[in-house]
Image (tube, rainbow, N blue to C red):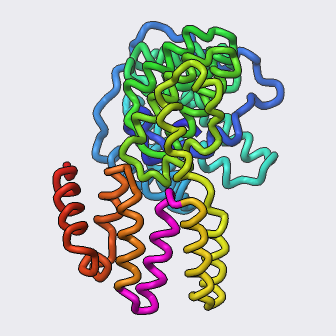
Amino acid sequence: MTCPTFRLLACGVLLSSAAWAQQPPTAPPGASPGRFSAVAPPARYVPAPPSPAARAALRLHEQGCQAEGFDDATCEKAVRQLEAVVREDPRQLDAQLALADAVWNQAFRQPEGSAERARLRQRSLDLYQQLVNLGVPDARPYYGLSVLTRDPKVRVELLRRTLELAPKHPEAHKDLAGLLLDQGQVDEAVREYRTHLSVRPYEGREDALADIQFADRLASAGRVREAAQVYDAVWDATAKEPRSERCQIFKAVDLDPYERIGARFAQQLRGLRAACTGTPRLEGAVELERQGRDDAAIQELERQIQENPAPAEPYLALQRLHLKKGRVDEAAAVMTRYFRQEKDSQERCRHFRTLSPRTTRALEPGLMNELDRACRARRP
């Protein structure tokens, strides 16, 4: 999925499209192969600001027609109102786009392979295509149709038109980069993805994993240095993430080819790996606690720390178990061991700020003051 609901404004698309990428549309039997086209005449469509009726219909669309939280009755009412708005004034572009989205999402409420599903999908495509054919001076219909269209050449045309109208459209740059890479146009794909990274607001693991997937494709195409640049960007974007999150994001990366070229992220990630892996006893301790065998779980966690003292999770679990049994001094001693061995100041402060107040009060005063001063200085 290229445009999750929480990123609609960044994508430049009014509509939720979570289902779009899951089942790419195809033209129905007998449709002309060239039906979905990016070719458009010079712009002559001048959108009008949303009317009061349009705003009311758009609110209904948001309430009931999104892919997440879809409600049949509310969406059907929204469709009727949107249709009325568009009949009254075809220049109501937001209403036209919402109608196309609503109909598309309605299609997925119908049985797979049914004539009604095909009809609704086709209607949605036609609504987007009509706006494209009018040369609407707005990026959204071009991008919306690009998501729904299978033909790679048409998609490239639509995405280029999207970027003419919205040069900082992050998802269009990303989609275009992927298509160009498919077509062997690697240099242009790299340029498009760099632009995507420069204009895209990073919003979490989903973004990072998409970037890593593109980097892996570049590496498979023999462009390891360009792939390393993407990895460097992911590394920088995740700098404020908890170490455990970074561990999950980068856990499958093969560092060898990147270390051979001296990639910055690879050198730093190698040092992080010790804190990312090597905690096989942690899961066993969790199971022992679930069985009510807290003392056995404590012993298992102590063994885990002896085997690999780097990860924070065993210390945190051990602290919690000691507190559960009322052993505050032991909880503080565990966390003292963690803070003494932890070299990453960001991780030290992250876990210091989330300590149980009982543990904090039981820390050695010197260590508590040291952490308090250092972590106050690190606050934004």
The image shows a total of numbered marks equal to 0
**Position of 168 compared to 379: left or right?**
right
**Residue 314 magenta:** yes
Assign the N terminus to one quadrant of the image.
Answer: top right
- Relative to 207, is 373 on the left or the right? left
Which quadrant of the figure has residue 325?
bottom left
Q: Where residue 119 sits in the image (x, y, percent)? A: 71, 40
Is residue 195 shown above or below 54?
Answer: above
Give x and y (percent) for residue 308. 57, 59
Q: Is residue 100 visible?
A: no
State the image quarter where residue 82 is shown: top left
Most frequent secondary structure within the magenta stretch: helix
Query: Is 2 part of what is drawn in magenta?
Result: no
Residue at screen point 42% across, 53% down: 242
Q: Position of residue 237 (x, y in %)?
A: 40, 36
Magenta span? 309-328
Nearer-the-camera pick, 198 or 35: 198
Q: Is residue 219 visible?
A: yes
Answer above or below: position of 16 versus 140.
below
Q: Nearer the viewer, residue 264 or 50?
A: 264
Residue 247: x and y, percent?
A: 53, 48
Residue drawn at (50%, 16%), measured in percent from left and top? 192
Vertical side of 268 occupied by 154: above or below: above
Please give the name of the residue rendered at 66% of the width and 24% of the height, measured from the top-left corner: 217
Name the one closer to the observer, 45 or 360.
360
Residue at 24%, 61% (x, y): give it: 371
